[in-house]
Amino acid sequence: MVFLLFAILSSSVLAVVLKYLNAAYSYGVYFVNYVTCAALAFLTLEEKSLYNGDPAPLWLGAIAGFFYLASLTASGYSIHKNGAVLSSVFTRLGVLVPIGVSILWFGERPTPVQALGVALAVAAALVMNGLPGKDRQKAAPKAVYLVPLLLTLVLNGATDSMSKIFTQLGRREDDGLFVLYIFLFAALFTLGLLLKERQPFSKRDLLFGVLVGVPNFFSSRLLLAALTELPAFVTYPAYSVGAILTISVLSFFLFRERLNRRQLFAVGMILCALVLLNL
């Protein structure tokens, strides 16, 4: 549970940093972010070795690194086609993928009370994020592009699922190595896009990339550690809604952002969900 709490805190700090920077991010920022994460992963390895006799960290890390960039690209494309609000809703729904994987593939079974907590956590995330309101609906109707939304859901969920898959297929002493390969391959894939798009690389990319990379690494590493202690149907919903709750609190104190009634209701749902998940 301690690892999960610190993972939530790291994820919340990452969100606050992104909000504070309040800028559009190029592939250069993402590249530096992944390089920073990979460097931190290597520095925290107990044995400074890139291979410990088991190929699982390498090939699973390569797949996860691809999903990291693919989910990012899908989210950006969906935001372009459908807007940020609806795309964020489907991003939140991605939590259903690792929960489904843990139940169908690894045989984890939540109790009825915990299943209710999972459903309440997903509902709370959707209520907190919100859907287009009545005022928006009165405007000229906008087409909804379903494929980008589904890709956002599936790819974000697949990205989260890789950590759970590694906890089942990999060795615990290789957890740090797995995280290293995730970000190393994500950096290589992003570098390929940088070269293809011929995007310029700036000092701003370097600064923003490092600022984003530090909390990004710790949130990923701690989430993996949490998954070795807790079932996925507890970890992922608690991680998602816990981060939402923490970000809301931090935003109030740092940016003086106040929650509306709908969001306050969602906070109550989050608290209830967290209680149910831990019963």
Image (tube, rainbow, N blue to C red):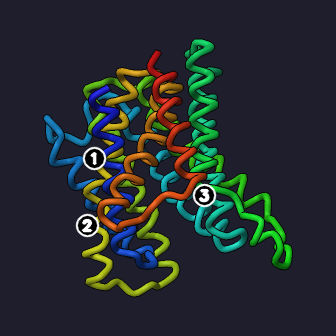
Mark 2, residue position = 210
85 or 226, nearer to the observer: 85
Looking at the image, residue 128 sits to the left or right of residue 35; the answer is right
- Residue type at numbered disc 3: Ser
> Which x, y percent locates residue 83?
67, 70
Q: In the rendered structure, which disc, 2 or 3, sits on the residue that comes first in sequence?
A: 3
Q: Residue at x 32, y 31 (%)?
A: 225
Whether residue 84 appears in this view of the structure is: yes
Answer above or below: position of 191 versus 6: below
Q: Residue at x 34, y 39 (%)?
A: 178
> Which x, y percent locates residue 90?
66, 52
Mark 1, residue position = 218
Which quadrant: the N terminus? top left
Question: Mark 2: which secondary structure?
Answer: helix
Distance from the alpha carbon under mark 3 to that under mark 1? 23 Å
Question: Mark 1: which secondary structure?
Answer: helix
Q: Residue at x 44, y 66 (%)?
A: 190
Nearer to us of marks 3 and 1 is 3
Question: Mark 3: which secondary structure?
Answer: helix
Q: Are marks 3 and 1 in contact (CB under 8 Å)?
A: no
189 or 121, nearer to the observer: 121
Q: In the rendered structure, which disc, 3 or 1, sits on the residue that comes first in sequence?
A: 3
Q: In the rendered structure, which disc, 1 or 2, sits on the residue that comes first in sequence?
A: 2
| Crowd around label 1: few <14 · some 14–19 · many ≥20 (10 Å) | many
Answer above or below: position of 3 versus 140: above
Whether residue 59 appears in this view of the structure is: no
- Residue type at numbered disc 2: Val
Looking at the image, residue 207 sits to the left or right of residue 219; the answer is left
- Residue type at numbered disc 1: Phe
Looking at the image, residue 244 sits to the left or right of residue 129; the answer is left
Residue 88 is tagged as 3
Distance from the alpha carbon under mark 2 to that under mark 3? 24 Å
